[in-house]
Amino acid sequence: MRIWRIVFANLKYSKRQHLGTSLGAALASMILVGALTVGDSVRATLSYQALERIGKITHLFISEDGYFHADLANRMQAGWKGNESAQFAPVLMTQGTLASPDGKVRASGVQVLGIDDRFFDFAKDPSQAPDLEQQNFWVSPDLAHELGVKAGTRMILRVEEPSLFSRDAPLSGERDARFVSWNRPFGGVLNSSQLGKFSLRASMEPVRTLFAPLSLLQEDMFVNFDPVEERTDFANLLLVLTNESENILEENMERVWTLSDAGLEIKKLQSDDTWSLRTRSVFLSDSIVNRAEEINPNLQGEFTYLVNAIRKPVRGQDLNTSMIPYSMVCGVDSGVEGLFSADWKDDQIALNQWAANDLNLSLGDQVAWSITPLENAENYCKAHIHLRLEKYCRCLKKLILGKRAIGLQGSRA
Amino acid sequence: MSNFLEIKNLTKAYSAPQGGSSSLVFSDLNLLVEAGKSLAIVGPSGSGKSTLLNLIGGLDRPTGGEVLIEGKNVHQQSPEEAARFRNRTLGFVFQSHHLLPALSALENVMIPALAGHGGASGQALQNQALELLHEVGLSERANHLPGQLSGGERQRVAVARALINGPRLLLADEPTGALDQAKAESLMELLVRLNREKETTLVVVTHALSLANQMEEVWAFDDGDLKKVDS
């Protein structure tokens, strides 16, 4: 008898147990191998799809605060300092509705990208870039499938005009939204090698994107956006292709970036040594305020708002008294600029002398004024407010009161 | 006759877990067994009978003292030497037969010879195993699996297995513990007969005094001490 006789005899004797164990092990192995294979497959698919969506893009600058000047890409390219080369492309990203002129075809919630030729430098195959000079609309494969239209068919794109301030702001009401539309021929489909599936969404949903020449969108979308400089060359994405680190990128951006890119302006006031930080977006974002306070902790916030009417209330005939229409109210902190004493109350108000004379007001008189309530924020203010005139103010052309009186202490201004 | 087994001042204590006081099983045991003798060790449960047998067989190490078999200290050998010593010199019979259920009685008997410490092999080994089965009265059942044998028959196969390498000392730990009275007596008669015929020194641990009386000497554990019982 040999040792193998014992082995085989035991295998034979316990064949049911061994068979069960073997089947269990095989089943467990199949499950594990299957799970790993499926996991690898899913991971590879997701990775492939993600790479299809971002192409060669290595970094991305997104304007948190609205829009920046598209020539930032040119300035970054010209002023680039780094061991590795870098390429930049401005993109205007928004949402819109696409429809055929007869209304039979319609797609809403479409991602609209304003691009120029530099966009295709980030595609897998830049040589397949379409001719954007023709001012056509191009779409992603998923959107083309959804629309089912042929090249050359005219399409109408409707996009909301950019607001001067964030849509998240209470003043932003959809009833005031204005739209811009274009009627252009459908140029064709941009496939994945042409970065036609570009998307920043981590989602498995179809990529429904319309591509249009950047200049075409800019000229119409931003016609009312910058009344001071009358510029329209805005974008809100900056694509980057480089092997450099984020630190180098940020260093280059800090060197090139200007306050104007962020829509900010620092201006010296005429009256004294005070400087003001203003934004074209109406509201300063928290990040900008925080940064400004880091630089100068003595900053004073100010909120200025439109007043519909200021009047002196007379009992029984409020509506027939004289009034000052469409003036401005300015909310400041107590004690600012030497206007108010520390015990200044929220029901006290200061008017300039002209307004007081016009309304025949004396110190201690009641002043009534009305403002338009903030959209969807009725709790933030009252439409009609009665305050007591406490002080004449010569230096200001605005009505002055404590910030809390208009209930806007939550808004940074 | 010369002393085959010599136990000198043998002490065994089990250390308590987590640093508690150790538990003394027995201390300073002394015992002399001549070659070819049969010896029974009796005592109540927990008195140290099996512990003593394990120490004699080299399956456990003593706290103090020594066990000499043919003048050789059992516990001062390398693991390889100890394995060879146990395989060639000692035979074990336990309360449970521990037969491999997949092998026949004949194959079970041959298993100890497969350890490769010398001795018979091949056809000679098979013949030797058959002869042993014949001696324990199971030549007709050589090709039966353990599951096809009765309890007494299985224990007889275990005895034959313990003898396959021609041990000079057979250690039996409660070999009749799982058997009824008739089969127990039959097995003890077998052990005694083999002891006489083969002159194999036999040490049997049992708590049944009636079975122990069939041995030439009976030693009993009494409160940690080992005393010879007058026949």
Image: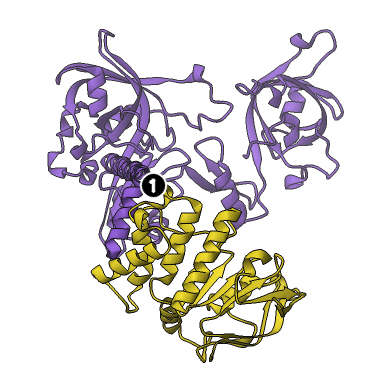
**Total numbered labels:** 1
- From the viewer's perspective, is B177 left or right of A137? right
Please, is residue B172 above or below residue B26 in the view? above
Q: Height in image: B81 above or below A5?
A: below
Q: Secondary structure at mark 1?
A: strand
Q: Nearer the viewer, residue A150 or A23?
A: A23
From this viewpoint, is residue A402 visible? no
Q: Quadrant of the C terminus of chain A?
A: top right
Q: Viewed as shown, does residue A242 lie left or right of A285?
A: left
- Residue B176 picture location, percent across and down: 57, 60
Q: Which residue corresponds to the image point at 47% horizontal and 79% vertical from the top-left?
A: B199
Q: Amino acid at mark 1?
A: Phe
Q: Residue at x 73, y 38 (%)?
A: A394
| Residue identified by numbered label 1 | A61
Observer-nearest residue: B35 or A68? B35
Tell me the subunit letter for badge 1: A
Colour mapping: by chain
> Does residue A252 show up?
yes
User: Residue A271, image x and y in percent?
Assistant: 64, 46
Q: Is residue B190 above or below residue A382?
A: below
Residue A7 sits in which quadrant? bottom left
Residue A19 in picture, x, y percent from top left:
33, 44
The yellow-coloured chain is labelled: B
Establish if B105 lies above or below A188: below
- On the image, the x and y values in percent for residue B93 come to 51, 67
Per the rendering, the colour in which chain A appears is purple
The crowd level at tag 1 (other Cα within 10 Å; few <14, some 14-19, many 20+) is: some
For the N terminus of chain A, the image quarter is bottom left
